Structures are given as structure tokens and as C-alpha cells.
Amino acid sequence: MNTFLKTISQSVQSFARDDEGAQVVEYALIIAVVSIILVVALRGLTGTTFSSFIDRVSTCLTGGACA
């Protein structure tokens, strides 16, 4: 039984030291910021309101006619 507890303890310590999850969060934040920048830039290029832009994207993604 003592070996079992030692193995679990080592696994928990290894998990606590693992910083791979932090890297995933950092990448997700970078992707979110880039996505926001792209939406703002595309909105400026299209010259339309944001809601109509989203409607056009939604139409294109659902298989409607894209203009």
C-alpha cells in the first residue's frame, strides 16, 4: 500500500510541475487577440456595420450566396 501512495504522490507532484497547460492558455489568448484584430480590420475594410458583417459571414458559412 505504501508503494501505491508513493506512486500517487509522485504523479501529483509531476502534474503540479507541468506547465504545458499555461502554454495552452497563452496560445489561446494570442489567438483571441489576433481574431479580434482581424474582425475589426475586416469591419473597416467592408464599410458596413458590424451586425451586417456578421450576418454576411453567417450566410456564407451556412451555404448561402456569398457576395
Image (cartoon, helix red, strand yellow):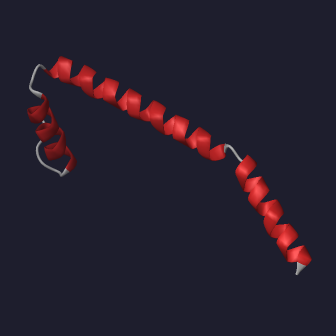
Nearer-the-camera pick, 30 or 55 = 30
- Relative height, residue 62 to residue 28 (above, below): below
* Total tally of numbered discs in the picture: 0
Q: Position of residue 9 (x, y in %)?
A: 81, 64
Location of residue 47 (image quadrant): top left
Location of residue 37 (image quadrant): top left
Q: Position of residue 46 (x, y in %)?
A: 15, 22
Q: Residue furthest bottom?
A: 1
Q: Position of residue 4 (x, y in %)?
A: 85, 76
**What's the residue at 11%, 34% (across, down)?**
51
Q: Position of residue 12 (x, y in %)?
A: 75, 60
- Relative height, residue 44 to residue 10 (above, below): above
In the visual, does 16 lie left or right of 22? Answer: right
Q: Residue furthest right?
A: 3
**What's the residue at 61%, 46% (across, down)?**
21
In the visual, does 35 lie left or right of 60? Answer: right
Nearer-the-camera pick, 13 or 45 = 13
**What's the residue at 44%, 34% (across, down)?**
31
In the visual, does 29 lie left or right of 64? Answer: right
Location of residue 13 (image quadrant): bottom right
**What's the residue at 78%, 62% (across, down)?**
11
For the N terminus, the quadrant is bottom right
In the visual, does 16 lie left or right of 60? Answer: right
For the C terminus, the quadrant is top left
